Image: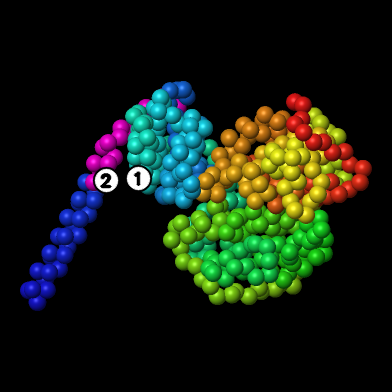
Amino acid sequence: MKKLFSMIIALFFSISLFSSCSQQVENQSISNFKTITTQELKDNLNNSNYIIVDTRINDAFNGWKLDGIERGGHIKGATDFSSYWLDVDIKDKEAKLLEIAKNKGITPDKNVVLYDANGKDALKVAEFLSKNGFKNIYIYDVKQWAKDKNLPMESYKNYYMLVPAKWVKDLIDGKKPETYKGGPFKIFEVSWGEESKDHNEGHIPGAVHINTDEVEEGPMWNRLSDDRLEKFALRNGITTDTTVVLYGTDSMAAFRVAVILKYMGVKDVRVLNGGLQAWKREGYELETKKNQKTPVKSFGAKIPVNKDYIIDLPEAKEILKDKEGSCLVDIRSWDEYIGKTSGYDYIKGKGRPQGAVWGHAGTDPNNLQDFRNIDNTMRNAKEILEFWKEWGITPDKRLAFYCGTGWRAAEVLWYADVMGLERICLYDGGWNEWCNTKGLPIEVGEPKR
């Protein structure tokens, strides 16, 4: 008995010593960088020699109250450089990350204030920057800032439309996460095809597969008729009062369905920010069993409840006529916009609707790199608004987003909604419909601005 007691004491001492050593190493790492007080940060908030950087997960920057913080969102005027980006597996990662930092104004000549709420994120980014020649680095705990309601913080108006993985996990575990009002919920993995390889290999527990053919059909790939969309909802157990969470290995399909569900009248539609990878990154479990759809008898409203959220060809023509107050925004690559390529093997026409303005995208139809961070979360809204402004795309106008067949534009529409833009919609037919409708004016080449 005495021997057992001695072993327990020895084990406890070893654990305590290890914990103490670990804390000393962490403190030693932190001591390599300067700290900044709340008052000093406040005094230099508008100092051009300072750059304030939020190093937390993208969801915290957007508005979620994570890691015990009292107010969600970011310090007003701060930019973002998430520590999560340092773990993304991409080619030439270090060079790419330094390029991202430079484009955000995070440069070695600035006093760089890195903040977090968990004592880890800022240190991780600080070590990366220090290794790459940054000298004037400061560490700050944003929980101190959030406690004082007189200090300015910013959140996206509808940040709740994009949810972190932890929010979904809490929902599954029977908790009541932030902004969830209770009631029935459904989780869907969305992709094209009756059978999803990704779904079968592992999906979020309880998730059911939605094939995008359930909401759209060729050759134009517009949404289905309202009565067929109602049948889709009933088959999947969706009512106006169901909280619907959507995700995918690539989120674009999830955004496509999300926009259609909001158009139909589902009051609470969420998309997992960063897709399935965000769930895996947190180390949450996956399941492989096939969950069955559970039908309902009534949707609860006459579809569409939000009719103006998706528009068709007649409305798109009207938007183009209103050159001062509206924009038809092209969410395709530059080469598609100027008519160098159609971007699709099944769309022959090249060019754009006459008068449409370029709203950015990526380099190909499967890429939205201009709107996503390197971990496929939503890009900083300020940066999006800045490159839109160059094309006259401003929040005061009515904005109709389109692409080839509605997928890319649906994702960008969702981001615009998250940001709080109000007069926004999806032109569902997009370039596929426009170029295949006789007599409609088409432009090619670089526009005169």
Residue 33 colored in magenta in the image: yes
Q: Nearer the viewer, residue 97 or 80?
A: 97
| Relative horizontal placement of residue 149, taking residue 225 as reference (left or right) | left
Residue extending farthest right: 439
Q: Which mark is residue 119?
A: 1
User: Residue 31 at x, y = what percent?
Assistant: 26, 37
- Which residue occupies 82% across, 58% down? 219
Residue bearing mark 2 = 26
Secondary structure category for the residue under label 1: loop
Task: Say if residue 366 shows up in the picture.
Answer: yes
Residue 286 colored in magenta in the image: no
Q: Which portion, as a residue range, is magenta? A: 25-45
| Relative horizontal placement of residue 198, taking residue 434 as reference (left or right) | left
Question: Does 49 appear above or below 23?
Answer: above
Q: Which mark is residue 403?
A: none
Between disc 2 and disc 1, the foreground one is: 2
